[in-house]
Structures are given as C-alpha cells and as structure tokens.
Image (tube, rainbow, N blue to C red):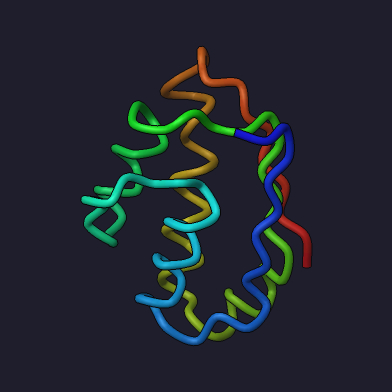
Amino acid sequence: MAKTVTIDVSTVASKSELHALLAESLSLPSFYGKNWDAFWDSITGLVDMPEVLEFRGIEHLKKALPKEATQLMTCLRDLPQDYPEIHCEIRFIP
C-alpha cells in the first residue's frame, strides 16, 4: 500500500458508489460486502492500511450522504482506539 492514499469523495452520490470507491482505493478484497461491517473487517485485518489516508471533499459527502459520511468517519476515528497497532493517520479535508 502506498504511504499516502487520497480518496476524493467530492462527487459521490450514492452509498454503492462510495463503497465501490473505498474498495478500489484501499484494494479491499474481491469478496468485500460493500457495507460498514465489511469495511470495518477489511480495514482492521484484511488489508494493509496506508500511513496516511486522506478524504477530500468530505463536506460534500456530509451533505449528499449524511448517514454514510457519519459511518465512514466513525469507523476511521475508532480505528486507532480499537487497533492501536494499525498506524494510519486519517485526514478529512473539506
């Protein structure tokens, strides 16, 4: 995995589009279930996380898909608390 992965969510319009973008950007496994439980399982043990993970356009995502934005941000904010051995700095950029 690259040291820094940037995911541009500034044009995402649906939950399925968001999960497809996450799967592609983070090289999630082909069996990725495209839901938040599957996302959590993937980032906590199935893939190597980058040193830095940036989300650009997070304000758009919050407006377009508020529930999905909240889920995404909650998962990523819980990651260092629940898995301190996974060293991945998360950045949310408006």
14 relative to 46, above or below: below
Q: Residue 89's quadrant in the figure?
A: top right
Q: Is residue 53 left or right of residue 48?
A: right
Q: Which residue of the protein is positioned furthest toward the front in this rendering?
A: 30
Quarter of the figure with the N terminus: top right
Q: Which residue of the protein is positioned furthest toward the right in this rendering?
A: 94
What residue is drawn where x is 50% and y is 87%?
Answer: 13
What residue is drawn where x is 47% and y is 36%?
Answer: 78
Quarter of the figure with the C terminus: bottom right
Number of numbered callouts drawn: 0
Q: Is residue 41 left or right of residue 80?
A: left
Q: Residue 35's quadrant in the figure?
A: bottom left
| Residue 18, horizontal then vertical, whole percent | 46, 70
34 relative to 18, above or below: above
12 relative to 42, above or below: below
In this view of the protein, which residue sits in the foreground, 68 or 9? 9
Q: In this view, does 8 lie to the left or right of 1?
A: right
| Residue 7, horizontal then vertical, whole percent | 65, 59
In this view of the protein, which residue sits in the foreground, 21 or 73? 21
| Residue 57, horizontal then vertical, whole percent | 72, 71
| Residue 93, horizontal then vertical, whole percent | 77, 60
What residue is drawn where x is 58% and y is 75%?
Answer: 62
